[in-house]
Image (tube, helix red, strand yellow):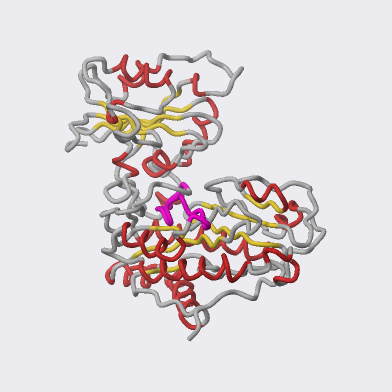
Amino acid sequence: MKREHLDALVIYGDREHFANLAWLTGYDPRFEESVAVLTRDDGNLTLIVGNEGAGYAGLSLVAAPFTGASADAGVKPATTMRIELFQTFSLLSQPRDKLIPLRKILRSAGVKRSSGVGVVGWKYFDRTETKNPKLASELPAFILKEIIAAAPVWTHANATALFMHPTDGLRATNSVHQLAQFEFGATLASQMVRDALFNLRVGMTEQDAVRNMRYCGVPMSCHLMLTAGERARVGLASPSTRKMQLGDPITMAVGLWGGLTARAGFLARDEKDLPPKIRDYVEKLVAPYFRAAVAWYETIGIGVTGGETYKAVHNIIGDPFFGVTLNPGHLIHLDEWVSSPISRGSKLKLASGMALQCDIIPATGTDYFTTNIEDGIALADEKLRAEFSQKYPETWSRIEARRKFMRDQLGIRLKPEVLPFSNLCASLPPFFLSPGMALCVRG
């Protein structure tokens, strides 16, 4: 904030765009918009919520007064947080009997008329999008209007990059405690996908397949996806009551806080269950895709640039047939996609503490459909690895088992700093009715 000449930050959050707010305050909005105000000179933190958030915010470890099990255990936050009610954030038709203008609440939180205010949402912009990126904001207009009214002397600035820049953002690298939480989410997400994958049957509905995931209630970072047939070709859709048929294209994904696992292929036992004209599916699409994924896993590492990682993938599947247009990998956190240092020609260097997704998505637009393995890893230098193994031995044993499996069974040679977080890392079954038959590198 000092570097950017900011006296106060106003951090926005809602159900879909919650991660910056949750990382800072320990509060994730459920039904309402919310705003946090952090002032630089005195470090005061104020959370502004609606009717229903006023009670739920008390679960945050930094909410004042600081009480409960964590206090009894001697866990102390760096600061305490004041909670203020702004009823316009509440759902429609709920009481507005205690309504105070937002600008007044912002002032009481420390935003002064001459304050330099940094506005944090979920996007920042560059000059290809707008002439003045620092002045652009995606926050709801009624909130931005009140921020400007509270601090009219100094124009607001988009400060989202402080949190979400792919290398310099506060959420780009993580402590060992955050990484342990992310491994927990990635483990559960990958196991949910595995349980669905290994229990698929022709004739079951998409929703029946999801029931096999045994979801335990850990917060999701995105909606759950599982579709087969023609709807699978568009991606992102939610499961329906449609009965799955032999030869269907199929895709599934589960994202929990800190981890997402996705798979795509065909509901088939082998190539004989596919239409004759695409029975070379493995040779034409899956095998080169797997080679690209192996290149990703063997290239990724501390000090490697995003451009090098991008090149390793596109050297193998850069042909337009594969249709790989999105970044082949990105940062993951409480939200499924933070930002990405991995792009063509990127000079941004990967660092210890980063949590990353292998996320290479072909979109052939043909009868070959697609293939996909998306899983999470972390990068950890020697010091962080030692801390990990000491403080979270059970987590570390899972990581070591995955590294061994990837080396001995899949033939993938990871650098020492690459920590697989998913139970399915790099496991690619082309035919979902034969989930134990996966690709590997020949010795």
Residue 438, given in percent of the width and then of the height, sits at 60, 74
Residue 278, given in percent of the width and then of the height, sits at 67, 64
Q: In this view, does 348 lie to the left or right of 278?
A: left
Q: Can residue 387 be seen in this view?
A: yes
Q: Which residue is drawn at 40% across and 31% down?
A: 12
Q: What is the quadrant of residue 314 in the picture?
A: bottom left
Q: Is residue 215 visible?
A: no
| Pick the front one: 117 or 80 | 117
Q: In which quarter of the image is the N terminus?
A: top left
| Pick the front one: 216 or 329 | 329
Looking at the rendering, the stretch of residues picked out in magenta corresponds to 320-335
| Pick the front one: 165 or 345 | 345
Residue 340, given in percent of the width and then of the height, sits at 37, 50
Check the image and report above or below for 336 versus 17.
below
Q: Does the magenta stretch include residue 333?
A: yes
**Count of marks overlaid on the render:** 0
Q: Which residue is drawn at 43% across and 14% down?
A: 100
Q: Is residue 237 left or right of residue 181?
A: right
Q: What is the quadrant of residue 45 in the picture?
A: top left
Question: In the displayed image of the protein, which residue is found farthest to the right?
Answer: 203
Q: Is residue 200 magenta?
A: no
| Pick the front one: 135 or 334 | 135
Q: Which residue is drawn at 45% across and 72% down?
A: 399
Residue 178, given in percent of the width and then of the height, sits at 39, 56
Question: In the displayed image of the protein, which residue is found farthest to the bottom?
Answer: 443
Q: Residue at x 74, y 63 (%)?
A: 275
Q: Is the magenta stretch mostly helix, strand or loop?
A: loop
